[in-house]
Amino acid sequence: MKQKTKNILGLGLVIALSSGVAAVTTYSLVAPKKANMAFEEMFPQNPNVHRASFNASDAAPVDFTFAAENSVHAVVHIKSTINAKTTTVDVQDPFSDFFGDFFGNGNGGRQQRQVQQPPKVGIGSGVIISNDGYIVTNNHVIDNSDIITVTLNDKREFKARLIGADAATDLALIKIEGKDFPTLPVGNSDDLKVGEWVLAVGNPLNLSSTVTAGIVSAKARNLGMGGGGIESFIQTDAAINQGNSGGALVNTRGELVGINSAIYSPTGSYAGYGFAIPTTIMKKVVADLKEYGTVQRALLGVRGGDNSAELAKEKDLGVINGVYVDEVTDGGSAADAGLKAKDVIVAINGKDIKSMAELQETITRFTPGTNIKVKVVRDKKEKTFDVTLKNSQGNTKVVKNADMDILGAAFRELPNDLKEQLKLTYGLEVTGVQGGKMKDAGITKGFIILKVNGQPVKTTAEFEDLFKAATQSPEQVLFMTGMFPSGKRANYAVDLSTK
C-alpha cells in the first residue's frame, strides 16, 4: 500500500513538473514586452466593488458572553409524554387456514388482539418569548402529547398547556402559568448576513442550557423534505444535536433570530449542518396561534420551482433568478390578478425573490386580504400585478380553529363484539347526538363511521385530524360513509361552514 501511494505521488510529481516545463516554454514565446505587469492590470476588477471601511483583523474578537447570558435563562427543557394506550391490531394465525378448512370454519387466518402500547417520552427545547409564560417550540417536539412538562434553567418545573401548533412551519406555542419569567428579545432575521456569528442555545438533556457558536452558512435554505411544509431555513454550522429542537438561534446582540428545528446528518448527530426557522416566519405564526388558535395563512396560488440558467436557456425566459410558474390555481389569488403559467416571479413588494424558499417565506408573513405587488418577467418583459391574497378556503375571512363540539356528537372506537357481529375490522361508533352539525345532517346515535372524505377512520384521533383538515378546506364538508348495526348502509354530508 505504501509503495502504491509512493507511485501515485511520483506520478503526480512528474505530471506537475511536465506541465511546468510546457508552461515555461509557452510563456517565453508569447510573453509581453512589459515586465512585472501588475495583477490588477492582468485581471481588471469591477470598479463597483467596495472594501469594508475597517480592517476586521484590527477589531477586538467577537464577545459571546452577553448574548449567552441573555439567552440561557430564557431557553427551557421540554418533556412531552404520550400516555399508554390500548389498540386493537390484526394478526395472522399461520394454523388458522389449515384447521379452518379441516373443520369447515375458516376465517382467512385473521385474528384481533389487544396491544398495550407503553408511554412514549420525547425531549426538546423551547424559548420563553413573554414574561407571562408563552413559549415557542417545534411542533414535532409536542405533537400528540398528553402531558407537556417545562423545566427552566433554574430547575423550576411547570406543566404547560398547548395554545396552538402548525405542522406546515413546524412551530408550536405553549404556555406555563406565572409571571416575571425571563424572556429573549425577538430580533429581525432579515438583518442576518451570511458569515455572521450566531449562537445555538438549547436545553437538550435537562442539565441546564448549553451554548454553541457558529456562523450563518446560508439563508432561505430549502431541504426538500416535502410533506407540504414551508421551508426557508437559516443554515448554520453551530452545533445542534437531538434535544436542541425548539431552542434558540441568537445573534451577538442577544436577540432571537431563529428557532432551531433540524439537523442534516447521516448519523443523527451533529455533522456541521443545522437549520433554524427564521423569526420573520415565527412572529406571524405564533401571533396567529395566540389570537386565533390556527394560522391565518395567505396563499398566492401558484405551483412552480426555482428558475435556473439551464431552465432560462431552455425556455428563453430572459432571466435566471426568481420562481418559474408551472401552474396557476383556478380561482386563486394569482389567477384573479392575471398571473399565468410560464411567468417568472422576481419580486414581491419591491423585495427580490430568487427562489421558491424566499417566495414561501415572504408570503408566509402576510394575512389573507393583504394587497401585494408581484413583479414577474413575461416574454422577457417586466410586469407588475396587484394581488389580493386569499386563504385556503378561497376567501379573505378569518379561518377559525373549529372545535369538534360543533358536531354535537360523541364517538367511540368500535368494540370487539360489534366488530365480530358486523364482520368489520374497524370503525367509529356515534354514541350520542345532541344537536349541532351531525344532527343537521340527519345522523343519529348508533351510526358507525367507516370513511370520512374517502379515508378509513379507525380511531377518534384520525377522525379529529380529518375534521381539522376539512375545516381548512374550501369545501368545508365531511362526507361520511358507514352503516348501522342493522346492516343498513348510509352516506351523509356534514356542512362545517359557519354561515
Image: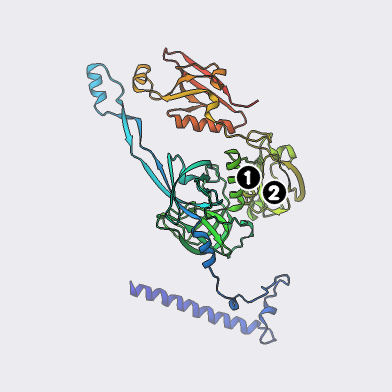
Q: Does 26 sit above or below residue 374?
A: below
- Residue at image position (65%, 35%) is 398
Task: Point out the image quarter for the N terminus.
Answer: bottom left
Occupied quadrant, residue 288 = top right
Q: Tell me: 80 left or right of 493.
A: left
Give the residue type at disc 2: Ile
Q: Which part of the image, by quadrant, shows the C terminus? A: top right
Callout 2 crowding tier (Cα within 10 Å): few <14, some 14–19, many ≥20: many
| SS at circle 1 | strand
In the image, taking residue 298 as reference, residue 125 lies left or right, namely left
Name the residue that disc number 2 marks: 345
Mark 2 lies on a secondary structure that is strand
Q: Mark number for residue 383?
A: none
**Tag 1 and tag 2, C-beta contact below 8 Å:** yes
Viewer-nearest residue: 47 or 198: 198
The mark that comes first in sequence, 1 or 2, is: 1
At which x and y percent is residue 242? Answer: 43, 54
Pick the residue in front: 219 or 142: 142
Pointer 1 residue = 304
- Circle count: 2
Alpha carbons under labels 1 and 2: distance apart = 10 Å
Q: Looking at numbered disc 1 in the image, what kind of residue is underneath it?
A: Gly
Query: Could you classify mark 1 by the number of other residues whose Cα lies within 10 Å: few (under 14), some (14-19), or many (20 or more)?
Result: some
Which residue is at the front of the view, 23 or 99?
99
